[in-house]
């Protein structure tokens, strides 16, 4: 009966094998069970989560297709429902222990090793006569199988595909001679990176991680090594009036530095997207990547821009990318100006939606941030539904504001379909997975992709540290937090998560020291110091901080007060503050089941009420550690 149930699940997955939109929710609906019931049943039968069950079935089918040579790695990735060949390659390697492009050499090696082993057994003089006839039969069978395989491989050349080509676009040089054009040059740097990111066969490093190489003396090979890429793009921009000229060089650093080509592109500002499309196609061809028909259609769509609106958009982007409260307001102002000049341009609306989301997910979020993000995302989607950034903005609203898990999952799938190289998308998708399933490795894998795509943004390695701590992997958490601090020694959030890891290891003095440093850099993290005191058994200091915070708490402090009181054992106050988190729809609230500080509350019936409000899995489905 159990095997029949598993066979039925596999049959459903098989019928949706090439559908990258097929989700855990879809499987649950098809089998006629709730998501949590299906998860428990699969876990009992196989020890897997539902998403792991689906993913491993897809990988097994991919293995079969690769052996049959029914396409290259990228083609088969899409055939089995992966919309990113790079993520497919990573999953395949994690599951089988080698990359998909080595499958044929591994198969031949397996045959040879078994042949050698059985030949050795058959000629062992101490072997008993009664086994000799069966050994000879086995030898003949293996030899025959080996001959068939080797003949097949020799007549059908192996279609190999290396891991997806990796590249980074270095900051472009401003040859205008005017520093007030830096925003325009930076904008084109961002635009080229974004266009290349839409090519699913490429792994493109985030713009933010390449900015450290502006005006650097570091040689090209070392830059490529630090970013983990094979190809680099250098370039310069010259602008006179509305005429724009870009000079691009494509460089390969393996096995040694080699300039593949250098090309010049010129257009007026109104036709800037035609030029960017041309650059994208040339670079893809230069690294031997073929565009899909859909990508070719998107790049071929003629689209003119209003020069003044585009300049305002680039200025807005320029200031938002500096991530300070002052530049945030200025950036939003320029983007709004761009929408007034040309309300039919989707880019300013898309960037506004992401900008408002950043504010909404911050420590001191404006009350209307997510509403503004939703409105901007709606406008952008009405104009152009193929922008990955717009779907990311929508997914973040669904994840952190409306708590619509099906819509969130659908949104992220569209992000990865239209742009599989947005580091921010993988980072937040990791948090989504952390929320809805118990597959720890799946959560970590996606956060690591964010780190790989944007290695010098400390936020993602800090997220990674936080997640490691929540699963009791404290040594890994400390290592990830220290990496963040090596990038930015004054990053308050990194000290915060470092303190969490030290608390988990019961190294309370180090934990308190880390939290004090975090508070020194940003007083908004004070609540975490109070929680650290509570974990360390210093009730007086914990209560002193709680009393001061409860006077007029900002949203993050309502969450922090719940943590402090839960740790101290005052469940009445803990639930009171959790109720307040729910009332104000604090964006972290859905993760109550993932926060080890709240473990003491899970036996209380009121905790289950909180989970039911969110339609989240029940506590017994999770195995978390107290820190």
Image: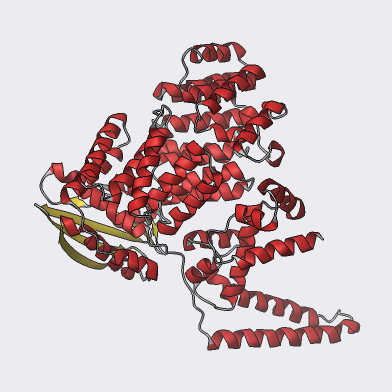
Tell me if I can see residue 208 in this picture.
no
The residue nearer to you, when weighing 199 against 340, is 340
- Percent coordinates x, y for residue 39 in the rendering: 69, 49
Quarter of the figure with residue 288: bottom left
Please name the residue shown 28% across and 53% down the image: 191
Quadrant where the C terminus sits is: top right
Find residue 551 and report its horizontal and vertical position in percent: 48, 12
Q: Is residue 83 above or below residue 434?
A: below
User: Would you say 253 lies left or right of 148 here?
Assistant: left
Name the image quarter holding residue 319.
top left
Q: Nearer the viewer, residue 230 or 440?
A: 440
Residue 490 visible somewhere in the drawing: yes
**Figure quadrant of the N terminus:** bottom right
Query: Which residue is drawn at the image coordinates 50% and 38% (left, top)?
Result: 402
Whole-percent x, y for residue 623 in the image: 68, 39
**Identity of the residue drawn at 34% across and 67% down:** 297
Q: How many marks?
A: 0
Q: Where in the figure is residue 61, as x and y percent of width and height?
A: 62, 69
Picture layout, residue 281 above or below residue 590: below
Taking the spot 38% from the left edge, 67% from the top edge, the residue there is 294
User: Taking 386 as reference, is 114 left or right?
Assistant: right
* Nearer to the camera, 507 or 320: 320
The image's colouring method is: secondary structure
- In this rendering, is residue 490 above or below 258? above
Q: Is residue 402 above or below residue 156?
A: above
């Amino acid at each position: 009966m159990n095997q029949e149930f598993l066979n039925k699940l596999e049959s459903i997955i098989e019928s949706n094998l090439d559908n990258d939109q097929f989700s855990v929710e879809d499987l649950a609906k098809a089998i006629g069970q709730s998501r949590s019931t299906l998860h428990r049943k699969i876990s009992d039968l196989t020890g897997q989560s539902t998403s792991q069950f689906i993913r491993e079935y897809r990988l097994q089918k991919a293995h079969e297709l690769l052996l049959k040579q029914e396409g290259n790695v990228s083609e088969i990735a899409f055939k089995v429902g992966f919309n990113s060949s790079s993520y497919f390659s990573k999953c395949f390697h994690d599951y089988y222990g080698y990359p998909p492009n080595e499958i044929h050499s591994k198969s031949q090696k397996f045959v040879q090793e078994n042949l050698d082993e059985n030949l050795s057994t058959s000629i062992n003089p101490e072997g008993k006569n009664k086994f000799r006839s069966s050994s000879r039969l086995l030898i003949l069978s293996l030899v025959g199988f080996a001959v068939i395989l080797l003949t097949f491989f020799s007549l059908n050349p192996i279609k190999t595909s290396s891991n997806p080509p990796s590249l980074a676009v270095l900051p472009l040089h401003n040859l205008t001679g005017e520093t007030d054009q830096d925003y325009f040059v930076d904008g084109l740097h961002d635009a080229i990176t974004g266009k290349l990111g839409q090519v699913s066969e490429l792994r493109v490093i985030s713009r933010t991680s390449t900015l450290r190489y502006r005006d650097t003396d570091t040689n090209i090979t070392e830059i490529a090594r630090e970013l983990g890429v094979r190809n680099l793009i250098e370039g310069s921009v010259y602008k006179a009036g509305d005429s724009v000229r870009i000079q691009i060089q494509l460089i390969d650093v393996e096995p040694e530095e080699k300039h593949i080509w250098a090309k010049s592109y010129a257009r007026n500002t109104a036709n800037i997207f035609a030029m960017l499309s041309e650059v994208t196609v040339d670079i893809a061809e230069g690294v031997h990547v073929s565009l899909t028909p859909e990508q070719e259609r998107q790049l071929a769509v003629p689209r003119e821009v209003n020069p003044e609106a585009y300049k305002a958009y680039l200025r807005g982007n320029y200031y938002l990318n500096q991530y300070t409260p002052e530049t945030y307001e200025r950036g939003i102002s320029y983007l709004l100006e761009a929408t007034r000049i040309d309300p039919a341009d989707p880019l300013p609306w898309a960037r506004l939606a992401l900008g408002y989301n950043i504010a909404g997910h911050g420590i001191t979020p404006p009350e209307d941030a997510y509403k503004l993000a939703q409105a901007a995302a709606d406008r952008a989607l009405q104009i152009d539904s193929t922008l990955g950034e717009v779907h990311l903005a929508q997914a973040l609203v669904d994840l952190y504001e409306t708590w619509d898990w099906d819509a969130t999952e659908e949104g992220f799938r569209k992000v990865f379909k239209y742009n599989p190289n947005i580091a921010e998308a993988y980072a937040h998708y990791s948090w989504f997975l952390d929320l809805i399933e118990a597959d720890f490795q799946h959560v970590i894998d996606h956060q690591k992709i964010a780190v790989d795509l944007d290695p010098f943004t400390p936020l993602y390695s800090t997220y990674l540290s936080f997640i490691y701590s929540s699963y009791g992997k404290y040594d890994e958490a400390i290592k990830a937090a220290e990496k963040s601090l090596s990038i930015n020694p004054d990053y308050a959030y990194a000290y915060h998560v470092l303190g969490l890891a030290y608390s988990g290891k019961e190294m309370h003095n180090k934990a308190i020291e880390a939290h004090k440093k975090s508070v020194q850099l940003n007083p908004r993290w004070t609540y975490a110091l109070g929680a650290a005191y509570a974990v360390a058994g210093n009730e007086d200091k914990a209560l002193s901080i709680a009393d001061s915070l409860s006077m007029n708490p900002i949203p993050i402090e309502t969450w922090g007060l719940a943590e402090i009181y839960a740790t101290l054992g005052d469940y009445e106050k803990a639930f009171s503050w959790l109720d307040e988190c729910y009332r104000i729809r604090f964006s972290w609230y859905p993760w109550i089941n993932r926060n080890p500080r709240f473990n003491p509350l899970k036996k209380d019936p009121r905790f289950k009420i909180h989970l039911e409000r969110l339609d989240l899995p029940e506590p017994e489905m999770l195995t978390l550690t107290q820190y």
